[in-house]
Image (tube, helix red, strand yellow):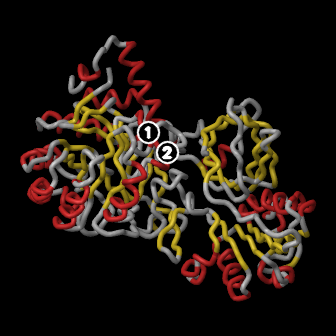
Amino acid sequence: MKEIHDFSFLALHRHGEHYFTLVLRHSHLSPMPPVAPGQFVEVRVDGEPGVMLRRPISVHDVDPDAGTLSLLVQVVGKGTRRLSQLTEGDRVNIVYPLGHGFSVDLPVSSRALLVGGGAGIAPLFYLSKVLKAKGVDCTILLGGRTAELIPVRDEFRPYGTVCLSTDDGSLGHKGLVIENPAFAEQYDIIYTCGPTPMMKAVARSAAERGIRCEVSLENMMACGVGACLCCVTDTDQGHRCVCKDGPVFDITSMKKWYENK
Amino acid sequence: MLAVKVHNLNLKNPVMTASGTFGYGEEFADFIDLNRLGGFVVKGTTGTHREGNPYPRMVETPSGMLNSVGLQNCGVEKFCSEVYHRIKHLDTNIIVNVSGSSIEEYCSVAEQIDALEHIPAIELNISCPNVKCGGMGFGTSPDMAAQVVSAVRKVYHKTLIVKLSPNVTSIAEIAKAVEGAGADSVSLINTLLGMAIDIERRRPFMANVTGGLSGPAVKPVAVRMVWQVAHAVKIPVVGLGGICTAEDAIEFLMAGATAIEVGTANFIDPAVTVKIIDGMEAWCKKHGVSDINEIIGII
């Protein structure tokens, strides 16, 4: 069941100038609905002239018992900049949970690889927590142009083996995530979220190696519920809404998408 | 207090939703009781399934947004055999927005929808700015508009609403032409043709280059056109364009609209329609208006 709820500001942690984590507390009368890893929320941005549409942001972490929701956000425009200025006493209106998340029903001791780049790291955190609780062995491979562009990397350590790649070699392996030695190992499933060229490269490699793979896409959205059809992606079945049919897609239906460089 | 009549359609209140912003209604069922609406207009439906335009299809602009979806829809056959059966039980007026690339396609879709018991009206879309063939091409010339409406009138027997384009010199002239051709009502405005450029990438934001502008930015234009058309025709006018609040809706009624449609505002607040209905009722009580019809077209 999708809901429109008010949350109150709890904390904001900055990670350099590009990223911040916004922690919100559920302050609505009815309880929080269950949120699956990979699902997203639509955040209303108040008090910023010119910002009208909600901003789709993936769930970085959620604790239904404590009633907290964490969003890892990259500052990309007026809307996300306004969110980075939220402070004590502010309220945030959210529509959630939206979309179709990652598949997490894996046998105990399965090996999973989570590949994240940039803001795409966000949904992988809650995913790694859920997988760890299911006894899945996770390798978390995070990439960025520089060390500063891989936020919250240390938060992942309790949930799996963390491997890092940077373009400039300032942290971890120098080069692309697909060139990291951890990427070449054998896995039961690969999950990926990040820049489109990175996800396509991961998907092509997974397809060649016969590894199950899910990609989480990020397109420009308006409604977030599959009504306006603005956020479509090409799939092997034609245009599908990233907001409703995704954002997570199994690559078996995405050949046309990942083969198109 | 809020009941109105658009030709043969009895609406429990003047609030409907605009085509393309409300899916098939189901997408909003978690947020509102759909039965509270005066009606809702489902996604533009064509003779065959359409994939629409390439991505990117939307961009936010000051107090509005541009879209160029290009009539992506499942086609009339699938609508009749699948979607219709999922929504037909609803206690509200379900109106199908009908589109096409040729007069034959419009007629064929309208005829198939005519056979559906629980669809009391169609909204004939002669104003989509985002398709190459048909759409707005039919809605910007009085002769073409009259031709398509009179052809559809011959095969469609229930309430026929014609959705007009604002991208014309005189919308009143088009309205008179479709009234003369047998339309039971006109709805306006569809989106205003616009464009936005990403100056960093030095290219248009949208793959289709141009798109339709909607949202609060277009509201004064829509109010003006509703007022002009209401004075030019005798058939009821359905007003839309940037309506976000009960006050906006009342403004359209005063300009001459019998009912209104809420579009882009559904994206900002998926429950906005019921807030508008409640707000209109509160406004009437506060102002001693016992019947909303008292204020329709008072300007």
Quarter of the image where the N terminus of chain A is located: top right
Residue B236 appears in view: yes
Mark 2 secondary-structure assignment: helix
In percent of width and height, residue A209 lies at 74, 87
The residue positioned 51% from the left and 41% from the top of the image is B270
Q: Which quarter of the image is occupied by the C terminus of chain A? A: bottom right
Dot 1 amino acid type? Leu
Left or right of residue B235, residue B116 in this image: right
Q: Which mark is residue B10?
A: none
Which residue is located at x 45 percent, y 62 percent? Answer: B57
- For this view, does A133 lie left or right of residue A193? right
Q: Is residue B211 left or right of residue A247?
A: left
* Residue at the farthest top position: B288
- Residue B118 drawn at (x, y percent): 30, 46
Classify residue B247 by image quadrant: top left
Determine crowd level at label 2: few under 14, some 14-19, many 20+ residues with C-alpha closer than 10 A: some
Subunit of mark 1?
Answer: B
Question: Is A257 above or below relative to B192?
Answer: below
Residues at marks 2 and 1, common chain?
yes
Tell me, yes or no, whether the two marked residues, 2 and 1, touch with CB atoms within 8 Å: yes
Residue identified by numbered label 1: B34
Visible in this render: residue B219? no
Q: Position of residue B24 (x, y in %)?
A: 41, 51
Depth check, front residue: A9 or A240: A240
Query: Which residue is labeled 2 in the image?
Result: B28
At 62% from the left and 78% from the top, the residue drawn is A252
The amino acid marked with disc number 2 is: Phe
Instruction: Give the residue displayed 39% in from the left and 66% down from the top.
Output: B209
User: Relative to residue A84, is residue A121 depicted above or below?
Assistant: below
- SS at mark 1 in the image: helix
